[in-house]
Image (spheres, rainbow, N blue to C red):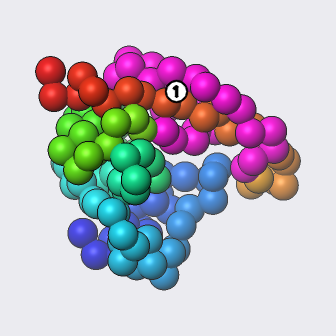
């Protein structure tokens, strides 16, 4: 997927955190260790640096949700990150995003911290981010 298509899908998927624009996707994809996974009207952007993976963002077309795309992408992320040498992974998710939190819990992620007021909602309200972690030593099993 091109940066423009990623930005369009991200905008259709998010209000909090704010959607990323085309330039932000382009810059991220040029960065070291960054990889993109595509699956059935969804994508995941991740990166691996110094043995640690970060799930940067995951977006699934709202019309294509609840069909396993998100789960498939998260599972592929863990495999890809482990293959690239990561031993652990982390991500940040809005404390108010119940669907994403359920997906991550179902795929083995555990809460390891909280960033108070990390995100700004559409009305300017501050929303906490949960920091989730996943050990990757078992990703291939």
Horizontally, residue 45 falls left or right of residue 95, namely left
Residue 106: say if magenta: yes
Residue 134: image x %, image y %? Answer: 42, 28
Q: How many marks?
A: 1
Residue 36: image x %, image y %? Answer: 27, 59
Q: Tell me what residue is drawn at x 84 percent, y 55 percent.
A: 124
Q: Quadrant of residue 86?
A: top left
Horizontally, residue 120 falls left or right of residue 34, namely right
Q: Is residue 95 visible?
A: no
Residue 98: say if magenta: yes
Asked if residue 28 is positioned above or below residue 42 in the image, the reply reads below
| Quadrant housing the N terminus | bottom left
Q: Quadrant of residue 111?
A: top right
Q: Tell me what residue is drawn at x 61 percent, y 25 percent.
A: 112
Q: Residues within 10 Å of mark 1 (few under 14, many from 20)?
A: some
Q: Which residues are magenta?
A: 90-119
Q: Tell me what residue is drawn at x 27 percent, y 27 percent.
A: 137
Asked if residue 28 is positioned above or below residue 100 in the image, the reply reads below
On the image, numbered disc 1 is attached to which residue? 101
Asked if residue 34 is positioned above or below residue 23 in the image, the reply reads above
């Amino acid at each position: 997927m091109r940066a423009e298509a990623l930005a369009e899908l991200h905008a259709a998927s998010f209000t909090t955190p704010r959607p990323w624009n085309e330039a932000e996707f382009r810059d991220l994809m040029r960065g070291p260790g960054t990889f993109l996974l595509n699956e059935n009207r969804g994508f995941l952007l991740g990166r691996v640096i110094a043995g640690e993976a970060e799930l940067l963002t995951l977006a699934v077309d709202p019309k294509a949700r609840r069909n396993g795309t998100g789960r498939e992408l998260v599972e592929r992320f863990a495999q890809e990150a482990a293959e690239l040498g990561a031993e652990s992974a982390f991500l940040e998710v809005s404390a108010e995003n119940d669907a994403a939190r359920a997906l991550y819990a179902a795929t083995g992620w555990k809460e390891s911290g909280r960033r108070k007021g990390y995100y700004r909602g559409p009305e300017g309200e501050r929303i906490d981010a949960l920091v989730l972690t996943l050990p990757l030593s078992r990703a291939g099993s």
